[in-house]
Amino acid sequence: MQERRKFKKRFCKYCETKVDYIDFKDVAQFKFSLSERFKIMPRRLTGNCKKHQELVTIAIKRARQTALIPYIVDRKNVVENPFEIIK
Ligand SMILES: [Zn+2]
């Protein structure tokens, strides 16, 4: 049985684009690392390297505190693409 994977290739998206700093105000930069319920995706799913996963985690936590992204999403509010709300 083949597992259905959300992410096909396992490579760090941030290493590929040579990002060395992730700004917490730039939601588009770390939206790959958020699930549809705004949870931080684990590294084994996104394929991020350790360095960038740590940067992403810090950025997401800061973005939550500054109310750029929600902490939790109610079951009713789950939509197909949550990033449409942010824009
Ligand atoms: Zn990386």
Image: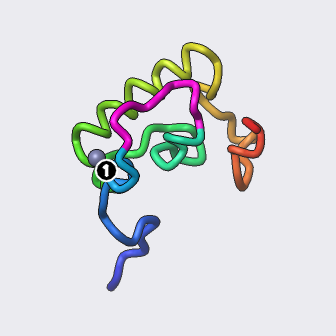
Q: Position of residue 16 (x, y in %)?
A: 35, 56
Q: Residue furthest top?
A: 65
Q: Is residue 18 left or right of residue 65?
A: left
The residue at 59%/47% (across/down) is 36
Q: Quadrant of residue 76?
A: top right
24 inside magenta stretch: yes
Q: Is mark 1 within 8 Å of ligand 1?
A: yes
State how the image is colored: rainbow
**Amino acid type, residue under disc 1 in the picture:** Cys
Q: Is residue 19 above or below residue 6?
A: above
Taking depth in this image into account, of 30 and 71 the one nearest to the observer is 30
Q: Position of residue 32 (x, y in %)?
A: 49, 49
Q: Quadrant of the C terminus?
A: top right
In terms of secondary structure, what is the magenta stretch mainly?
loop
15 inside magenta stretch: no
Q: Is residue 6 above or below residue 70?
A: below
The residue at 32%/85% (across/down) is 1
The residue at 49%/18% (across/down) is 62
- Mark 1: secondary structure: helix
Q: Quadrant of residue 37?
A: top right
Q: Position of residue 69 (x, y in %)?
A: 62, 28
Taking depth in this image into account, of 52 and 73 the one nearest to the observer is 52
Read off the residue under disc 1: 15
Q: Is residue 12 above or below residue 6?
A: above
Residue extent of the magenta highlight: 19-27
Q: Residue furthest front?
A: 18
Q: Is residue 84 above or below residue 11?
A: above
